[in-house]
Image (cartoon, rainbow, N blue to C red):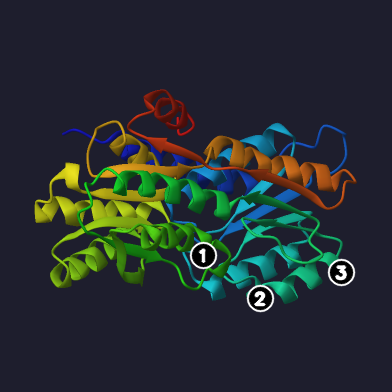
């Protein structure tokens, strides 16, 4: 039986995280300075997403390289679970917490408790007031590169009407430029229109929503997703409907490994605004290390890049980040 590369990588990453959690529970070596080993804890609200798994694994590897103990949790979109996990870390007295919440207001009180206890508070993806640092990637830049790409594609369609679906995450207001900017660009095109906009964060929901919209608009030909996971669901819907690849445009964001593999062929999947996952994970550990060593208000920001079939060198480079 053939096992897809992305599945093998995902299993390997998850296994590595489980092993690291077990080892962390038993304690680790002392930090290079000879004192008690310090602990960095990382909570990603969408912990089940492939990019979150990859980023967490890279953060763990870098943290351990720097001499830290590394903890991560698995809230899978459940705010109550994430809050409980962070409360436990505060009680345990970890040294730094790096957090990506769906809604920053749900952890604002925890930030104060952590900082009052001397724990460094670092945010991921979006900034919070008075945080000690932040690991950011520009959602505006992500939306802009997809907006430019889809605008160029629409211009090649000979003036025929182009109907689009936006797959969104309305609760994540900080990432709204990912779909708002491409949506505005589509509406600005003389022959473009957005016919539907619905939340979809995973592949199954992306498939269901796209199939539903195709029922109402059989001539739907463009799907812009706030991430690659739901965009891959839209891809399956287009394939099931027998829509010609030359007539369609699907774009995601983040640079999911399966999306990058789709870009190795000239098919429905036209682009993703990709992040460099190894660098992003390493930045989590690096910024925690800098803050724990006395720096303040440290911000590291990564700019997404447009990956497409036309640039196979970049696609290969980004795929290497997942190895």
Label 2 to label 1: alpha-carbon separation: 17 Å
Q: Which residue is mark 3?
A: 116
**Separation (CA) of disc 2 from disc 3:** 18 Å
- Closer to the chain start, of discs 2 and 1, is 2
Disc nearer the start of the sequence (2/3):
2
Give the farthest residue toward the right: 294
In the image, residue 163 lies at what x, y percent? 25, 62
Pointer 1 residue: 176
Image quadrant holding the C terminus, namely top left
> Are the residues flagged by discs 2 and 3 in contact, CB closer than 8 Å?
no
Question: SS for tag 3?
Answer: helix
The CA span between labels 3 and 1 is: 32 Å
Residue 265 position in % (x across, y down): 25, 32
Which residue occupies 66% across, 66% down? 86
Q: Quadrant location of the N terminus? A: top left
Q: Which residue is mark 2?
A: 105
Q: Mark 1 Cα within 10 Å, few/some/many (few <14, many 20+)?
A: some
């Amino acid at each position: 039986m053939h096992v897809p590369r992305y599945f093998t990588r995902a299993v390997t990453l998850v296994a590595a995280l489980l092993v690291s959690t077990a080892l962390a529970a038993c304690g680790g070596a002392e930090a290079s300075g000879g004192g008690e080993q310090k602990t960095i804890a990382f909570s990603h609200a969408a912990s089940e997403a492939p990019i979150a798994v990859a980023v967490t694994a890279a953060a763990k590897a870098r943290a351990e390289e720097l001499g830290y103990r590394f903890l991560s949790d698995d809230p899978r979109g459940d705010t109550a679970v994430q809050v409980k996990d962070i409360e436990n870390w505060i009680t345990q007295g970890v040294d730094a917490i790096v957090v990506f919440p769906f809604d920053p207001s749900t952890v604002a009180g925890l930030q104060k408790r952590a900082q009052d206890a001397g724990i460094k508070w670092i945010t991921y993806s979006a900034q919070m007031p008075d945080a000690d640092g932040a690991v950011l990637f520009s959602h505006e830049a992500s939306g802009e590169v997809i907006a430019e790409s889809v605008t160029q594609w629409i211009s090649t369609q000979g003036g025929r009407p182009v109907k689009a679906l936006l797959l969104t995450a309305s609760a994540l207001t900080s990432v709204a430029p990912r779909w708002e900017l491409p949506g505005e660009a589509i509406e600005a095109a003389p022959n473009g229109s957005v016919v539907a906009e619905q939340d979809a964060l995973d592949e199954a929901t992306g498939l269901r929503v796209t199939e539903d919209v195709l029922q109402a608009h059989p001539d739907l030909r463009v799907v812009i997703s706030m991430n690659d996971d739901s965009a891959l669901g839209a891809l399956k819907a287009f394939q099931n409907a027998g829509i010609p690849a030359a007539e369609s445009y699907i774009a995601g964001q983040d640079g999911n490994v399966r999306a990058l593999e789709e870009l190795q062929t000239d098919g429905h999947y036209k682009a993703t605004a990709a992040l460099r996952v190894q660098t992003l994970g390493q930045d989590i550990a690096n910024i925690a290390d800098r803050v724990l060593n006395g720096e303040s208000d440290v911000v590291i920001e990564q700019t997404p890049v447009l990956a497409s079939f036309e640039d196979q060198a970049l696609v290969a480079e980004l795929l290497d980040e997942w190895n």
